[in-house]
Image (cartoon, rainbow, N blue to C red):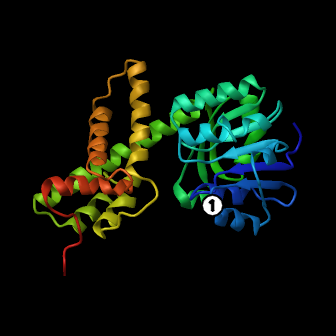
Amino acid sequence: MGAITRIGFIGLGQMGSHMARNLLRPDTALVVSDLSAERVEALCASGARAATGSKDFADCSLIFISVPGGKELKSVVLEEGGLMPHLSKGQTVVDLSTVVLSATREVAGALAAKGVDFLDAPVSGMEKGAQAGTLAIMVGGEEPVFERVKPYLERIGKTIVHMGGHGAGQLTKAINNSLYDICIAGTMEILLLAQKAGLDPVKVGNVINNGSARSFASEHFIPRVLDGEFRGSFPIAWAYKDLITTHEVAIEKAVPIPILSAVTGVYRTAMQMGHGMEDKGSMALVYEDILNLKFRRLPE
C-alpha cells in the first residue's frame, strides 16, 4: 500500500477530536463523523470534510474509530447504517477505543471475512496526551498491517508498541488501566485512614507525592480531592469495565488475583452507591461516606 491520501475518523469526543486534528495534513484528506455537529464543524474549520453517512468512508484507505465502548464500536461497524456494507478488501480499520475483548474479536472476525484489515489500538495518556500527540498506543493485529499504519499512529502518539494478535492491544490497555485503578483505590483508602487517625490531609498528600509512595494516580488525584474537584471525563464505570476484562482473563488463565478481586469489589460498591458516572477521583467519596468525614484542605 502506497501513501494514504484519504483517512476517515469516526468519534470526535474528548480524545478523538484531538487525535483527528493531529492526523490533518495538506496531502491527506480527512473525512470525519460524530454525533455532535459542533465537533464536526470545528474539525472542518481546520480542513477536514464532514461525512454525510457511512458511505462516505467507502474510499478511505484507513479509518480510525474512537468511541466509548464495545456497544458503540459494534454499532459503527456491524449494525444497520454502519460501515460494513461500504467496506472492501484493502481497507484498514483501526479502533482507538477501549472496549471489551469480546467486541474486539467479533469486529475483527467480521472484517477479516470481508478482507478488511483491523487493528485494536487503544490509547493511554489522557486528554493532554491526545492534544500533544504524545499518547501511548498499544496495538493488536497482524504485524504487516501494524507496520503500514504505524506512520499514521505516530501522528497521534509517541510510544507505539505492537503487542501481538487481535485483542492484544485491548488486553494490554485493560491491564495498564487495572493497575492504575488499583493505585487510585489504594490511594483514596489510605488518605481517608490518615485523616481518620488525625493527620493533616495536605501534609499527608505532600509527603506521599514527594516520597516512595508517589504515583501518577497520587499526583493527579490528591490535589483534586483536597479541593473537592470530582468533575472529569473518565468515570468509575469505565474503570470497572477494565477491571472486569482483566478479571475474566485471569479466571480463563487460572491466575490467582486476590488484590484485583478486592479492588473490583470496591469499584462495584462505588457504582452501587451512585458514583458510576463520576470521575475516578470520586473513589474518595466512597470512603468518605463510610467514615462520615471529608478529605479536604483544613480551613485556615
Give the residue type at disc 1: Ser
Name the residue at 14% across, 63% down.
199
**Which quadrant does the N terminus fall into?**
top right
Q: Residues within 10 Å of mark 1 (few under 14, many from 20)?
A: few
Examine the rendering and report whether any part of residue 240 can be seen. Answer: yes
Name the residue at 76% across, 69% down.
45
Name the residue at 32% across, 34% down.
260
Residue 163 in the image, given as x and y percentages of width and height = 60, 32
Residue 71 in the image, given as x and y percentages of width and height = 54, 39
What residue does disc 1 label?
36
The residue nearer to you, when weighing 164 against 289, is 289
**Which quadrant does the C terminus fall into?**
bottom left
Furthest residue toward bottom: 300
Side (left or right) of 253 relative to 88: left
Total numbered circles: 1
Residue 79 in the image, given as x and y percentages of width and height = 65, 36
Side (left or right) of 233 relative to 184: right
The residue nearer to you, when weighing 211 against 36, is 36
Furthest residue toward front: 80
Examine the rendering and report whether any part of residue 138 can be seen. Answer: no
Is 60 located above or below residue 165 in the figure?
below
Question: What SS does tag 1 mark?
Answer: loop
Furthest residue toward left: 197
Quadrant of residue 296 within the rendered picture: bottom left
Residue 96 in the image, given as x and y percentages of width and height = 62, 44
Is 178 located above or below residue 157 in the figure?
above
Name the residue at 43% across, 39% down.
241
